[in-house]
Every structure is written in structure tokens, then in C-alpha cells.
Amino acid sequence: MTSSYSAISLVFVTCFAIALAQPNTCSQCWNIGSTECCNAKVVPCPTDKCLAIYEYCVVDGVIYQTISKRCGDEASCGICFSVTTERGITARAATECGTGANSNADLTYK
């Protein structure tokens, strides 16, 4: 009985260790002039955070919107900033993170 319990415990511990060693995956893409990410690929990431970056820019009255997705980290999550120049150029960017495998796939332009 003890040896079967030990074998089951060993299998459980091994499976758990393999699961923990698997890298997180995130969507990766970058589309200029669009609020949707097409042709996204899935890439391995070193952390459990997946990042989406939303950019809005106005140049000479023309609005450009961009979305980008990639691996993230705690420091890159929840950032928002805006800049306006004397020449009337406005740029805004915001970031949002998801946690876990491919968690930025469904994040949409905000």
C-alpha cells in the first residue's frame, strides 16, 4: 500500500512540476491605423502577464489608432498617458494586462 501511495504521489508531484514549468503564452501583434489585431500569433512569455497597448494619435487633424499585443509584466500594466505639442499633435497611450495563457487575446481597443 505504501509503495502505491508513493508512486501516486510521485506522479502527482511530477505532473505539477511540469505544469509549473510550462511558459505562459500571449497573443502578439501590432496594427497601425486599426483598433483590431489581425494576424496575431501566440508566443511564449517569461511572466504570467499578457499586455495590450492602445494608442491614439492626432496629426494635422487626422486620427490614427493603433493596437499592439505582446508579453507583459507587472510594471507595464495599467499605464495611461497623454501628450499634446504646441503644433497640435496629440498622442495618448494606455495599457491593459491579462493574467494567464493567451489572456490578451480578447482584450479590445479602449
Image: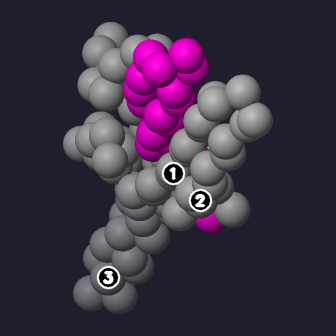
Can you tell which mark lies on residue 5? 3
Front residue (pair 83, 25): 83
Name the residue carrying label 1.
Answer: 95
Type of amino acid at the residue the image marks with label 2: Ile
Report crowding for label 3: few under 14, some 14 to 19, many 20 or more residues within 10 A (C-alpha). few
Q: Main secondary structure of the magenta part?
A: strand
Which residue is rendered at x = 29% and y = 15% of the image? 38
Q: Quadrant of residue 11?
A: bottom left
In x, y percent, where is residue 47? 59, 53
Image position of 84 (left or right of 15):
right
49 in the magenta segment? no
Report crowding for label 2: few under 14, some 14 to 19, many 20 or more residues within 10 A (C-alpha). few
Q: Measured along the vertical axis of the image, is residue 80 above or below residue 91?
A: below
Image position of 1 (left or right of 43):
left
Type of amino acid at the residue the image marks with label 1: Thr
Q: Which residue is situated farthest in the right direction here?
A: 86
Residues at badges 3 and 2 in contact (C-beta under 8 Å)? no
Q: Secondary structure at mark 2?
A: loop
Q: Measured along the vertical axis of the image, is residue 29 above or below residue 8?
A: above
In x, y percent, where is residue 55? 50, 35
Name the residue carrying label 2.
Answer: 79
Type of amino acid at the residue the image marks with label 3: Tyr
In x, y percent, where is residue 17? 51, 61
57 in the magenta segment? yes
Asked whether residue 100 is in view, the answer is: yes
